[in-house]
Amino acid sequence: MIKLSRNTILFFSLSFILILLTFATRFYGGADILDYLDSAKFFAGDYSAKIRLSHSYAYGLLHALPIGLTESFIFFKITSLISLFGIVYSVYRITNRDKRALWLSLLSPIVWYMAPWASPIQLASLLFLWSYYFVRSYDKNEQLKDLCYSAILLGLSLVFWDGVLFFIPFFVLCFFYNKKLIQTINFIFFIFVGLTPRLVLDYILFGHPLFGLLRYSASAMYIIFFGGVYEQQPLSGVLKLVIVLLFLPFSSYALFKKNIFQDNKKNIIFLLACLLITVFNSQIRLLLFFIPLLTIILCKYLTKVQFIIQIIFYMVLSLLVIVPYIIQINHDTNFKDFGSIPYLTEGMQITPGFTERMIKQDLNQISLDYPIQVLLVGPSFEDYRLLANAYNGENIKEFVSFEDYNLWANNDTRVFGKEMCSHVKIPERRDFCTSFSIHKSFNDATDYDSIVYAISTGDTLNSSEFIFVKKYESLSIFSKIN
């Protein structure tokens, strides 16, 4: 009979709780979640709407087959858990099986926070962790194979998550500033080798291998400087920043001791750059990208007392982190995850039943009551995505956004445009201007003339063209006035 140690039993017990919580909660993530779910349904051939993403399609493609076979998004949670346990084990392995690193990784609040998320950050972070490992090896021995492995893994992480794009310049600067130019060129070349699957996919989908990266970069820059086309919530804020900083090991200040900093100068400077990116975004999920790296460096310098205090703090914060997930096992709530605290200005609300389940039931009935229809969806421009994401069937031809409908009605295609000019102060004859715009698809094949009915996700539609017909459990149906 195999006798397990107390630490082994505790490790597997905590792992089982993490797995159980991930599958029990109905939470799948917050920011950008629909991008990944939509793309999976799109590739599975079960998405009854035009797709509109701001992120890589690759992560959705990875999940398309199981989503198509099961009509369930549960495989996203399986991928998340595999990636997170891969990160925990990798940190343990990279630190030469340091048990303190193992416990710091498993009990880290960021792991418990990200477990239920349908997000590519978990997989990208695992790939990035090993890229970091190999670049550190290359920095010591300068073996070409380590450079190749690091760059290819870095490129692969960018295949699945666009946010890696912001970290790559700092990665290259921090670890290659003292290298020969040819070494840097080789590294960048092999990044593109790792990025090849995405370049091929984007070429097939859009006709240009860099389309997705260029679109994401332009979108991200616009949100940072102008706040977003659709008036998105600001990415930063004092309370958001405080919540993000809570997830960092509070003993991180030890890395700035002179002897420790000198021994890990490149690594610490890179971690500071990662923290700077996170400060500007103030999103908890970004921390998963570099906390494992921080753990690798920090754990060997922690005293026994510091380690115990950090573990206790991690356990308390992890318990707080999973509270919203526990609530969502049996209830709907506006307290979706720990990061939603800044938005709870009107107090926490907990309601029985599940909106998603009611929407699916309503759509199944609507598809029988109004079969083979092109259905307009409102009142929000983005509500059509919720319905297209929830519906599995062929009895509804298409869900259409009010934004596209209004553009068609006005014989217009431009969704958004902005012009920026120089406005010189001297009596110069010329001012320089540049402009950019977003347009509705030029090959839009939707039959807008055939639209007779509209669906509202609430009780109103905010349109004088349609009148109320029927209220279902969650959705309402409206008919167009002749």
Image (spheres, rainbow, N blue to C red):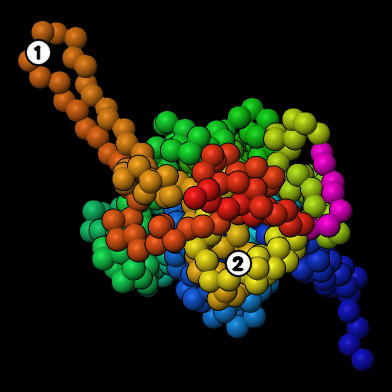
**Label annotation for residue 428:** 1
Across and down, in percent, residue 238 comes to: 64, 27
Q: Are marks 1 and 2 in contact (CB under 8 Å)?
A: no
Region of the chain picked out in magenta, as a range: 348-354
Q: Is residue 161 visible?
A: no
Displayed quadrant of residue 99: bottom right
Q: 396 and 434: which one is in front?
A: 396
Q: Is residue 352 magenta?
A: yes
**Residue located 74% across and 48% down the image:** 336
Q: Residues within 10 Å of mark 2 (few under 14, many from 20)?
A: some
Q: Is residue 477 visible?
A: yes
Q: Residues within 10 Å of mark 1 (few under 14, many from 20)?
A: few
The amino acid type found where label 2 is placed reads: Tyr
Across and down, in percent, residue 144 comes to: 34, 69
**Label annotation for residue 370:** 2
**Residue located 57% across and 79% down the image:** 68
Vertical side of 155 occupied by 404: above or below: above
Label 1: state its secondary structure. loop
Across and down, in percent, residue 15 comes to: 79, 68
Give the mark, 1 or 2, whose residue is nearer the N terminus: 2
Label 2: state its secondary structure. loop
**Residue located 80% across and 52% down the image:** 332
The amino acid type found where label 1 is placed reads: Glu
**Residue located 27% across and 39% down the image:** 436
